[in-house]
Amino acid sequence: MVAINFFCVSRFSNPCVYPSLRGVKSIRISNCFTRSCSVTYSVGSRGDEEEKMRYHMQRKEREITSEESLHSILRAGKFMVLALSYKDVPYTVALSYGYDEDENACYFHGAKIGRKMDYIRANSKACGIVIQDRGYVDGECSHAYRSVVVEGTMEIVRDKNKKSQALTKMFLHLEEHPENLIKRFEGDHDAISGVTILKLKIESLTGKQSKE
């Protein structure tokens, strides 16, 4: 059994919206005031695997539910801020990516060694965010944006042909004129061998946008 503590902030007397959890054994609410309250959930376990917390977006009018809109943000983005974890130590890194809608995956390239690779080898679960920055809204202390949170599993692409295909997808996604880069890497096994290709297999997408 696990106890999970978090704080939920609400304005005025609006009720707080809490995570929806399967297997909840008990709930304890304390320190509940107008602006914040502390909630403890006791969550039952299923074997050795803890139940996954499922959250509802508090501002439902801000949620992007259209799959096409979610995919359009990924198609338009150029980089993703990727969150990784290893032995309870978090790490974030911003990476250029190529989105493959048919495979429901994002591709990244990088060096063979380093902190990012150590984290991924130890824990393949990853979460990333892509943001369309539409600028600060002067006079409202607000920001215009659209964003999508990507959750999934990272894997290292090792097959040379698949690495070549992934690089091509990245060039097509990122470059205005990708032909030269595609030609340069096409069939160059030494160059392809020297780069690490990562694939984020997308398991869920969650979108949010500012007030229009």
Image: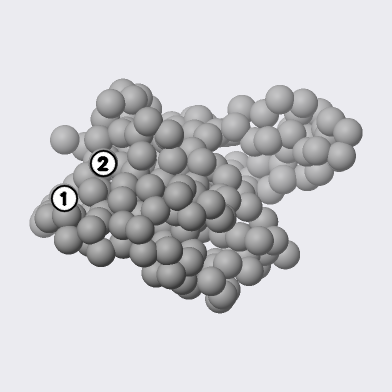
Q: Classify 105 as above or below 188.
A: above
Q: Position of residue 200 (x, y in %)?
A: 49, 47
- Asked whether 133 or 71 is in front, the reply is 71
Q: In the image, residue 184 lies at what x, y percent?
A: 25, 64
Label 1: few (<14), some (14–19) or many (≥20) C-alpha neighbours in 10 Å: few
The furthest residue to the bottom: 114
Figure quadrant of residue 12: top left
Location of the N terminus (image quadrant)? top right
Q: Residue at x 17, y 61 (%)?
A: 180
The residue carrying mark 2 is: 75
Marker count (numbered): 2
Q: What residue is pinned by disc 1?
A: 134
Q: Residue at x 31, y 47 (%)?
A: 169
Task: Give me the disc on residue 145.
Answer: none
Whether residue 29 is visible here, answered yes or no, is no
Label 2 vs label 1: CA separation? 16 Å
Q: Report the quarter where the C terminus lies.
A: top left
